Image (cartoon, grey):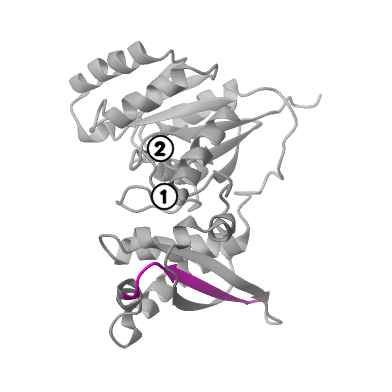
Amino acid sequence: MTETTRCGFAALVGAPNAGKSTLLNRMAGAKLSIVSPKAQTTRFRVLGILMRNHTQILLVDTPGIFQPRRKLDRAMVAAAWTGSEDADITLFLVDARSGLTDEVRGIAERLSAGKRRIWLVLNKTDLLEPERLLPLTAELSGLLSVEHVFMISARTGNGVEDLLDRLADSLPEGPLLYPEDDLTDLPDRLLAAELVREQIFLQTHEEVPYGATVETESFAERPDGSVRIDVTIYVSRASHKGILIGERGRRIRELGQRARKQLESLLERPCHLFLNVKERAGWDEERARLRAIGLDDSV
């Protein structure tokens, strides 16, 4: 007798810094979405694929939802809402420490206007007293109808297994959409660019990470099984270029070395990573730049 399989999409939706990317990586058991302590790190939809109890759970990490100013911002927010609308279940992730902020309230009100299946996931619950969680749950449940409430810590993994088990039982019956050993649908060249961008977030400060975008120009297989990857970092100001390169090229070398190590771990083969920094004012309003990082350029 053939085992019944299930397959479906679960979108992670929430305000910037709610912990969506950390949760995706925790659930998938692999580094798929870049993470930094800074808000608005994720810029496009990232898909994590995992098998659990004969169910293929397709986890969609979306950009944080905030008030957009630039064309880039509008494309990021549009990607987040599209991810939610296309999903079988929306996981509304809320930073329990920050509570019911104006951003969280706005997201809850828009979610309540749709006909989605919504699960409320309170994250970072290991960082505050349990008695503060029930009033927050009551407030949020008053703003929108939710099927289930989960209290988790994406950082420690507390409560995540229960969430995964419930997802596996709740997604619709159907055939698997991806091979069982796939982890993501991200192309390797986009993964390379994202790992470089993560290092920019981790190693530089203030406006530099938000004024930069990263594109893989070439991804060439070599006869010895290794790969040569040429990556361009576009920055909006000349001063940002100087910061990224650093004194005698020290910063750019460190960026490349750390990104290369992570990339070799994910691709499981040697990588030769070459970085180039170019000043390009206004890149965040260019349609070609948005398309290059997987965003809809029509917003």
Is 233 colored magenta in this rendering?
A: yes
Residue 145, x across and y down, in percent:
43, 12
* Mark 2 neighbour density, 10 Å: few (under 14) some (14–19) many (20 or more): many
Identified at 25% across, 16% down, the residue is 134
Image height of 28 relative to 107, above or below: below
What amino acid type is highlighted by mark number 1?
Answer: Arg
Left or right placement of residue 42 versus residue 52 in this view:
left
The magenta region covers 225-238
Q: Visible in this render: residue 95?
A: no
Q: Where on the picture, by quarter, is residue 252?
A: bottom left
Image height of 68 relative to 113, above or below: below
Residue 51, x across and y down, in percent:
61, 38
Of the two numbered discs 1 and 2 in the rendering, the one whose residue sits closer to the viewer? 1
What amino acid type is highlighted by mark number 2?
Answer: Ile
Identified at 55% across, 38% down, the residue is 59
Q: Where on the picture, by quarter, is residue 16?
A: top left
Q: Which residue is mark 2?
A: 65
Q: Which residue is mark 1?
A: 70
Query: Which numbered disc covers residue 130?
Result: none
Q: Where on the picture, by quarter, is residue 282?
A: bottom left
Q: Which part of the image, by quadrant, shows the C terminus?
A: top right
* Mark 1 neighbour density, 10 Å: few (under 14) some (14–19) many (20 or more): few
Residue 160, x across and y down, in percent:
42, 33
Left or right placement of residue 38 versus residue 197 in this view:
left
Q: Earlier in the sequence, mark 1 or mark 2?
A: 2
Is 168 colored magenta in this rendering?
A: no
Residue 168, x across and y down, in percent:
58, 27
The residue at the far bottom in this view is: 248
Left or right placement of residue 157 versus residue 114 in this view:
left
Residue nearest the observer in this picture, 179 or 251: 251
Identified at 35% across, 84% down, the residue is 249
